[in-house]
Image: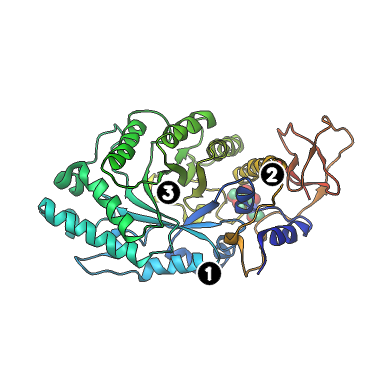
């Protein structure tokens, strides 16, 4: 076992090795940088080698198998075997769990959605489902997505079985049941198209207040972050919406990020735009201290949900199918490294965390291993970059000289780092 500082130092001492996303996010003050995954993918050993590296992904979200259709396929019959595969994977690798999800109109078994329930019956069904599932995972989940996607895009409530029978009261009912079953888990409302201002974001603010006014606990709001290349809001627009939620006393997180091309094949300019779009999202989270982390909805195009849901679209992830990192990956890495550097320079304590304790050797096999020393003969600034900090790359305007004894190593066209 290695403490983070030791593991990071060991990793960075390897020529050509780079700091990975979670380790940089933590150094920048976040709780995690994570990924969703799913049961079928865990038989892909090349994929798993990247996923299990907690320096890269310090948090895991089960993509499907904690949903109602898997966990209570018939009334009163509970099954956690598939969900347990993912939660055990995360625990074995020292990764934080975001648990997903308890109440959602989709992937809901027809015994729930097609029943004709009284309010009392459906309340019992909700309470029983949540008590069982949250109870089963008690102590394991950093956070639960308690209610998922309660809103239509125009800000009205979805008329699913829960709303039709219970009105908006099903939402505080669900949060109260989750709070009772695991007092330590952070309880989240999670949705998409609430990342930018508009009727849906306003309605989501209303959901936070609805829960609070009912005397129930809500700890966080999850912004899914399914964006389109060239159609992603700016960092400042995103951060401003995050702050409007933080004002209500909740933490925030990006929970399902991907940035898809709406038409393929992708162009070189498109990859640059995609990198900028990912950077807007990560930058918004970095700009808001109550934004605890960023989760991508899988990191590898091979397992992206996009092509099967949006015909003709795709290439939405940080890695290509061949497990090579895209320009977007390096852009995110660079942003996190810069934030880690500025955090480190204003703090006297090294980042430490038990979440990064790992018994596995840090792996960087998916990353380029070429190392070149960049020229430092024409520094444009007298300031120096600290250990791990960025010191060069396309578009970089910060310091190009490293604090002693570190040297600036080019990792790729977008990113040179003080190692
Ligand atoms: C991986 O796939 C991408 C996209 O097809 C390609 O540009 C890249 O060169 C590939 N990398 C490797 C190492 O095969």
SS under mark 1: helix
Q: Estimate how packed mark 2 is, as few (under 14), some (14 to 19) or many (20 or more) residues with alpha carbons within 10 Å.
A: few
Percent x, y for residue 369?
Answer: 74, 56
Q: Estimate how packed mark 1 is, as few (under 14), some (14 to 19) or many (20 or more) residues with alpha carbons within 10 Å.
A: few
Q: Residue beneath label 1, please?
A: 92
Compared across the picture, whether 238 is left or right of 415 comes to: left
Viewer-nearest of labels 1 and 3? Answer: 1
Compared across the picture, whether 161 is left or right of 290 comes to: left
Could you give the CA–CA distance between mark 3 and mark 2, rounded to whole angstroms?
Answer: 44 Å
Percent x, y for residue 352?
Answer: 64, 56
Q: Residue beneath label 3, please?
A: 307
User: Of 9 and 376, which appears nearest the observer?
Assistant: 9
Residue at x 30% of width, y 39% of height: 207
**Scheme of image coloration:** rainbow
Percent x, y for residue 258?
Answer: 48, 45
Viewer-nearest of labels 1 and 2? Answer: 2
Q: Earlier in the sequence, mark 3 or mark 2?
A: 3
Could you give the CA–CA distance between mark 1 and mark 2, rounded to whole angstroms?
Answer: 31 Å
Quarter holding residue 151: top left
């Amino acid at each position: 076992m290695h403490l983070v500082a030791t593991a990071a130092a060991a990793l960075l001492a390897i020529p050509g090795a780079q700091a990975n996303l979670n380790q940089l996010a933590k150094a920048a003050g976040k709780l995690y940088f994570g990924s969703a995954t799913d049961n079928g993918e865990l038989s892909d050993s090349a994929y798993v080698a990247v996923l299990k590296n907690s320096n890269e992904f310090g948090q895991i979200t089960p993509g499907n198998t904690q949903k109602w259709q898997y966990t209570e396929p018939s009334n009163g019959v509970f099954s956690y075997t598939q969900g347990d595969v993912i939660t055990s994977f995360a625990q074995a690798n020292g990764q934080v769990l975001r648990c997903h999800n308890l109440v959602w109109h989709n992937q809901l078994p027809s015994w729930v959605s097609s029943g004709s329930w009284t309010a009392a019956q459906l309340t019992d069904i909700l309470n029983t489902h949540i008590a069982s599932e949250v109870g089963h995972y008690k102590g394991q989940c950093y956070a639960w997505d308690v209610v998922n996607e309660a809103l239509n895009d125009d800000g009205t409530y979805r008329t699913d079985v829960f709303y039709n029978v219970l009105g908006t009261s099903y939402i505080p009912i669900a949060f109260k049941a989750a709070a009772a079953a695991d007092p330590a888990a952070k309880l989240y409302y999670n949705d998409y198209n609430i990342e930018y201002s508009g009727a849906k974001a306003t309605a989501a603010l209303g959901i936070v207040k609805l829960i609070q006014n009912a005397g129930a606990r809500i700890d966080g709001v999850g912004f899914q972050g399914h964006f389109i290349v060239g159609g992603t809001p700016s960092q400042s627009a995103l951060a401003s919406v995050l702050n409007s939620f933080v004002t209500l006393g909740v933490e925030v997180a990006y929970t399902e990020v991907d940035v898809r091309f709406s038409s393929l094949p992708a162009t070189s300019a498109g990859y640059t735009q995609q990198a900028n779009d990912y950077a807007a999202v990560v930058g918004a989270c970095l700009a808001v201290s109550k934004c605890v982390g960023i989760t991508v909805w899988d990191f590898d195009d091979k397992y992206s949900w996009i092509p099967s849901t949006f015909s003709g679209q795709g290439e939405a992830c940080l890695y290509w199918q061949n497990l090579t990192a895209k320009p977007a990956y390096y852009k995110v890495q660079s942003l996190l490294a810069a934030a880690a550097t500025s955090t480190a320079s204003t703090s006297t304590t090294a980042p430490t965390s038990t979440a990064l304790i790992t018994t596995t050797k840090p792996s960087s096999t998916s990353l380029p291993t070429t190392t070149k020393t960049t020229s430092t003969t024409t520094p444009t600034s007298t300031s120096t970059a600290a250990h791990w900090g960025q010191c060069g790359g396309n578009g970089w305007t910060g310091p190009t000289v490293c604090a002693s004894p570190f040297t600036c190593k080019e990792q790729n066209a977008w990113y040179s780092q003080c190692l």
